[in-house]
């Protein structure tokens, strides 16, 4: 079945998605998808956008932004099929929000009242009045921990300086040592990681970026160990591995 498609722009992509989801002539795989099955792809595409930006690859960034835009259109199409909202509603909603949050640009105010103040006012209009409302559960764990801590800090629930969360790290380490069961150890380890995020926040360090960079350093050094090792790593003892690791740290 042939479909007449707009020539360019967002409307073309919307029409393509409508054709893919057509109950009679659409793609079998695309018709089966739901919010829940597509959500992991949405998260993955957002990370791929961030990765292209970090690498400074503009050609890749263009492609990845297209993939991410497809996710928006996909979700909007599923919602429209259910009678919830359309892509036009999505675009109108974000346009209205940006205008509302920039009264100094689109209104008569001379100075911005502040992004966070405007968002707080919007949260005050919602049913959930908590300072922690609407921190997405699907965020990476480190980022979600940081956002929860920042929200709590805005209402004064915070250590006055970095010494508090630093001491908390020692406390949580001791509690891991004292834990009797695997379940207790897992809970205490979670508390430890949460405390490390809090410490990073007080040092003005992005924990997500710091861990990502640490992982990259590990990968680079491990590959160097593999390169310089005279035999397979699983045939070496711990002292030999440590010697190669220290050399790799010096060289890369």
Image (spheres, helix red, strand yellow):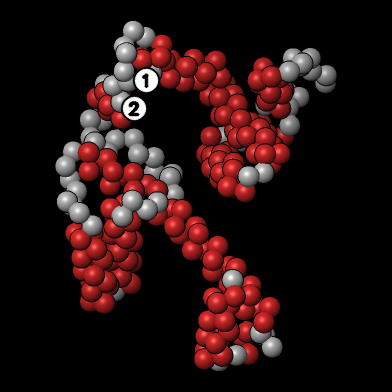
Say which label, 1 or 2, has the lower sequence index.
1
Query: Whole-percent x and y of residue 45?
Result: 59, 41
User: Which quarter of the image is occupied by the N terminus?
Assistant: top right
Mark 2 crowdedness (10 Å alpha carbons): few <14, some 14-19, many ≥20: few
Q: Which residue is mark 1?
A: 101
Query: Whole-percent x and y of residue 237?
Result: 55, 92
Contact between marks 1 and 2 (CB within 8 A): the answer is yes
Determine whether the residue tagged by mark 2 lies in a helix, strand or loop.
helix
Q: Is residue 149 left or right of residue 164?
A: right
Please name whichever residue, 111 or 179, is drawn nearer the observer in this view of the structure: 111
Q: Is residue 210 above or below residue 188?
A: above
Q: CA distance from mark 1 to mark 2?
A: 7 Å
Q: Is residue 179 left or right of residue 12?
A: left
Q: Is residue 77 left or right of residue 112?
A: right
Q: How many marks?
A: 2
Q: Which residue is mark 2?
A: 115
Determine whether the residue tagged by mark 1 lies in a helix, strand or loop.
loop
Query: Whole-percent x and y of residue 189?
Result: 32, 66
Query: In terms of image quadrants, where is residue 107?
Result: top left
Q: Measuring 29% from the left and 35% from the top, which residue is drawn there?
A: 133
Mark 1 crowdedness (10 Å alpha carbons): few <14, some 14-19, many ≥20: many
Please name whichever residue, 139 or 85, is drawn nearer the observer in this view of the structure: 139
């Amino acid at each position: 079945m042939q479909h007449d498609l707009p020539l360019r722009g967002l409307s073309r992509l919307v029409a393509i998605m409508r054709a893919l989801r057509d109950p009679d002539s659409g793609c079998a795989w695309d018709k089966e998808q739901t919010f829940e099955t597509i959500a992991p792809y949405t998260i993955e595409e957002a990370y791929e956008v961030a990765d292209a930006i970090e690498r400074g690859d503009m050609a890749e960034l263009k492609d990845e932004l297209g993939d991410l835009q497809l996710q928006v259109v996909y979700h909007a199409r599923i919602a429209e099929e259910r009678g919830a909202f359309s892509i036009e509603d999505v675009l109108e909603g974000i346009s209205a929000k940006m205008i509302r949050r920039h009264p100094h640009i689109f209104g008569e105010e001379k100075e911005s009242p502040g992004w966070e103040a405007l968002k707080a006012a919007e949260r005050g209009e919602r049913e959930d009045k908590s300072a922690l409302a609407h921190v997405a559960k699907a965020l990476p764990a480190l980022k979600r921990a940081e956002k929860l801590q920042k929200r709590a800090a805005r209402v004064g629930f915070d250590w006055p300086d970095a010494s508090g969360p630093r001491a908390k790290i020692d406390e949580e380490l001791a509690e891991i040592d004292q834990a009797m069961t695997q379940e207790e150890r897992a809970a205490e380890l979670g508390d430890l990681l949460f405390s490390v995020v809090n410490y990073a926040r007080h040092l003005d360090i992005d924990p997500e970026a710091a861990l990502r960079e640490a992982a990259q350093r590990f990968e680079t050094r491990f590959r160097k160990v593999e390169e310089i090792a005279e035999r397979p790593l699983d045939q070496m003892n711990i002292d030999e591995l440590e010697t190669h690791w220290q050399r790799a740290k010096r060289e890369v």
